[in-house]
Image (cartoon, rainbow, N blue to C red):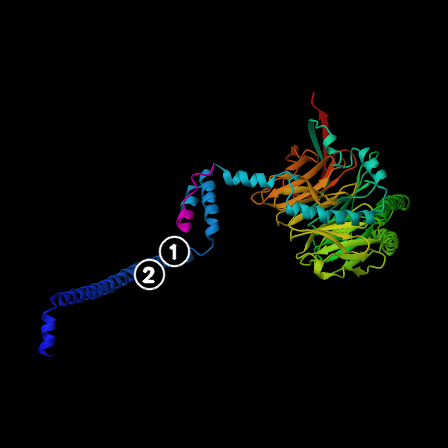
Amino acid sequence: MSNKDFRNNEAEPNSLDTLNEEYKEKFKKIEDCSNEIIKNEQNGQNGKNEQSEQNGKNEQNEQNEQNEQNEQSKNLNGKKNFFNIEKIGFYEIVLKQLYNDNLIDTVNTLKKELNLQENISAKNNYLFNLYMDDLFKSSNTKDEKSNLKEIIGTNILNRTAYLYNYNSNNVNNYICNNNSVLNYDVGHERNRKMFHYEISDNIELIHKEKCTCVATNYFNSLLCSGGSDNNIKILKLNSTKKNKIFNIDDKHTGKINCLKFHPFKNILFSASNDCTIKIFDLNTVIKKKKQKQNYNQTKNKIQNKIQNKIQNKIQNKNLDKNENPNQQWYYHQQQHKYTRENLVTGIDEKNKNLIIQDTNPFICLYVHPSGDFLYTSNKNENIIKLYDIETLTCFTSFDKNKYHTSHVNNIDGTTDGNIYASVSVDGNIKLWDGHNSELIHTEHYAHNGYSIQSIKFSKSNFYILTSALDGQTKIWDIRNFKLCSTFGNALSCSSNKSIFMNSEEYIFNIVHSSDFISSKIYVYNSYFGNLEHVIQNIHNDKIADVVNAKDGLSVYTAAYDGLCKKVCITQKDIQ
């Protein structure tokens, strides 16, 4: 730089000061920016540290929660894993119900097992009341299931109407004008009456062992009973003469399970544990017995006549001491033998009984109203067999997928033979076409899945009566398969059987609990569902079978005490 320039710079001091100030401001801004950047970097690092710490805490909490859930799942698995989270409330109410029933030991055991406490907020007997409300709820309550039943029922009604092919007006008039025929269509118009009951019983037939079944013919002139002594006894009912009892000589080799009569002939069908069905013409059997009785009378006359001749001979000829008396006795035996052989041979030639042989024992029988066909079921078989009685040819339904899933307990049909029904151990009711054995309808779990023991059709063919091991007896309308009435205490039992009485206003129910055997008989009102009367002390052991007698509300019963009795039930108005 020259001296001139230097002088010029010294001559302008203000301009240099200004420049220095500008540089200071710039350096200050740069410093402030750097300080801000450093500060932001420090804050960012701190935020990352805080975020990582927070994430670590969250991960630790999640890990702890996961461990707790794993421990809970392990505990649940250790409890046999038999309930889920939705059932906790249910088990709490169960504990409450058990506590209300004073089952303290059971409650404490379940508490340890379930690791739960009883529901304190639930009312006393809440679960039981809920069960009873559901069990006896009104049949008018409609839901999706009942609506589906109505749709199915319409199809059943159309099918049964086609099968019956009747004038409904005439049928309805007949039902309405006959008080002995069950009719729920006008049941609400009936007035409930109170009666006093008088019971009397008479012993009709006696077996050496258990009496297992009983039957009467269409005219109520013959009563038959079968037992575990393999015998069939026949009682000829006659009000003017002393009742006569006959035994069937051609007996089974196993227990008699069922007896049924031909609809209008004195032909008896017997089903036995010896895997046979025997068909007896009782007119021939009774005639044979009468011939034997006549023979016995003739034999006595011959014996008396011969004895008188011998005595006369002794008196007239004064027999010597050396005369052989065996000759006289030999002559008498020869005469007796000759007469007996002639009579028995003639009877045996005429009395040829038909036999149906199978591989499993026969359980029940149902004779078609025409008398031409016999429906049967066997133990350990789930099918119904149809026999042509004339040819003994066996038929079964061609659709095996529609059979019951277990053996059939009972079969019954309408009075015209258009429909027959079966009940089984599988708990289902099946309606079949009586013409071609096609399945019409299946009512699944009709008694909550329990085995159904008996079924009976009403006189109008509109209703069926079923009894099952759930302790209940039910009346169904097969036109739409609605439940009309329910009877019984809803306690499981070992056997249960019911029939419509002669007046279908009442039903006759025999039920035996699993704990003890009693001979109680229950009479219910079909329309109002109330228990009319309890008959006790008729038999000393389990009652196995019951059929209607000819008069009034009387019935014949067969029991394990070996007796077949007539139980007379008399109604008297309460004054």
Between 318 and 246, the one lying in front of the other is 246
Q: Dot 1, how many residues are within 10 Å of its Cα: few (below 14), some (14-19), or many (20+)?
A: few
Between 335 and 495, the one lying in front of the other is 495
Q: Residue at x 77, y 54 (%)?
A: 375
Q: Is residue 525 above or below residue 514?
A: above
Q: Is residue 59 above or below residue 412?
A: below
Q: Position of residue 70 (x, y in %)?
A: 38, 59
Quadrant of the rendered image containing residue 517: top right
Q: Which residues are magenta?
A: 109-123
Q: Is residue 176 left or right of residue 21?
A: right
Quadrant of the rendered image containing residue 406: bottom right
Q: Is residue 328 above or below residue 500?
A: below
Could you tell me the amino acid type at mark 2? Glu
Question: Of the numbered discs in the image, which one, if any, rests on residue 72?
Answer: 1
Q: Position of residue 474 (x, y in %)?
A: 67, 42
Q: Earlier in the sequence, mark 1 or mark 2?
A: 2
Could you tell me the amino acid type at mark 1? Gln
Residue 116 within the magenta-colored segment of the rendering:
yes
Residue occupied by mark 2: 59
Which corner quadrant holds the N terminus?
bottom left
Farthest-out residue, bottom: 2
Residue 539 within the magenta-colored segment of the rendering:
no
Gap between marks 1 and 2 measured at Cα:
20 Å
Q: Position of residue 305 (x, y in %)?
A: 89, 44
Question: Of the numbered discs in the image, which one, if any, rests on residue 35?
Answer: none
Which corner quadrant holds the C terminus?
top right
Q: Is residue 485 left or right of residue 370?
A: left
Q: Residue at x 75, y 47 (%)?
A: 154
Query: From this viewpoint, is residue 327 visible?
Result: no
Q: Secondary structure at mark 1?
A: helix
Q: Dot 2, how many residues are within 10 Å of its Cα: few (below 14), some (14-19), or many (20+)?
A: few
